[in-house]
Amino acid sequence: HIRKFDPENKFLTQIGSRGQGPGELMYLSSFDLDAQRRIYVNGQLKCKIFSPQGEELKYFTLPRYTLNGAIRVLASGDIAVGGWIQMAWPGQEFKDTHLIKIFDLEGNLQKQIGDIYDYGKYPLNSYGNRFHFDVDKSGHFVVSFIYQNRIEKYSKEGDLVWKADRFLPY
């Protein structure tokens, strides 16, 4: 669940409860707010959208590779998910080659931003490319890698516009 507090740290309300049904959350990995203070939650392969009062307004299923990723609401109304590069599931090949995925509010993939570095081994690709990201006021994506000495900035169109790195050979 998500708990809402006022500026004086007084508890206001709880949004969601444990479960997989309407208004419920499971394995919450990230949330963000839009300009109308609606709450967008990434949890258990679903994006759930709640009103500021905590009423579930909508949800859609996210692809498996977005599991555990951070979610950001874009000025366009689309959502960006990224941060966790998924390892191959048993019997599958590693296919995740982009850092951030942009979805519309129906769950349709609109765009992919940034390329992962291929270390040649699935677990290294997953761990070596994990990152945190945010979106600045201009709509640029700023990516900070957890296990690499690297920061990248992408335009809202997805072009790499700045990079600082020192290669770490795993």
Image: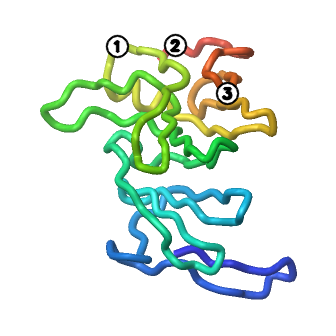
Give residue 136's position: percent from left, percent from top: 77, 37
Residue 28 to residue 88: above or below:
below
Residue 167 horizontal side relative to residue 91, left or right: right
- Give the residue type at disc 2: Pro
Residue wearing tag 2 = 169
Residue 33 horizontal side relative to residue 23, left or right: right
Residue 28 to residue 66: above or below:
below
Give residue 72's position: percent from left, percent from top: 61, 47
Label 2 residue SS: loop
Q: Who's the residue at 80% across and 82% down the image?
A: 9
Of circles 3 and 2, the one toward us is: 3
Characterize the local packing of mark 3: few (<14), some (14-19) or many (20 or more) Cα atoms within 10 angstroms.
Answer: some
Residue closest to the eye, 8 or 113? 113
Q: Who's the residue at 55% across and 45% down the image?
A: 79
Residue wearing tag 1 = 120
Of circles 1 and 3, the one toward us is: 3
Give residue 68's position: percent from left, percent from top: 44, 49
Counting residues from the start of the chain, the first of labels 2 and 1 encountered is: 1
Residue wearing tag 3 = 156
Label 3 residue SS: loop
- Give the residue type at disc 3: Lys
Residue 14 horizontal side relative to residue 34, left or right: left
Counting residues from the start of the chain, the first of labels 3 and 2 encountered is: 3
Characterize the local packing of mark 2: few (<14), some (14-19) or many (20 or more) Cα atoms within 10 angstroms.
Answer: few
Quote the CA–CA distance across marks 1 and 3: 29 Å
Quote the CA–CA distance across marks 2 and 1: 12 Å
Q: Who's the residue at 28% across and 25% down the image?
A: 94
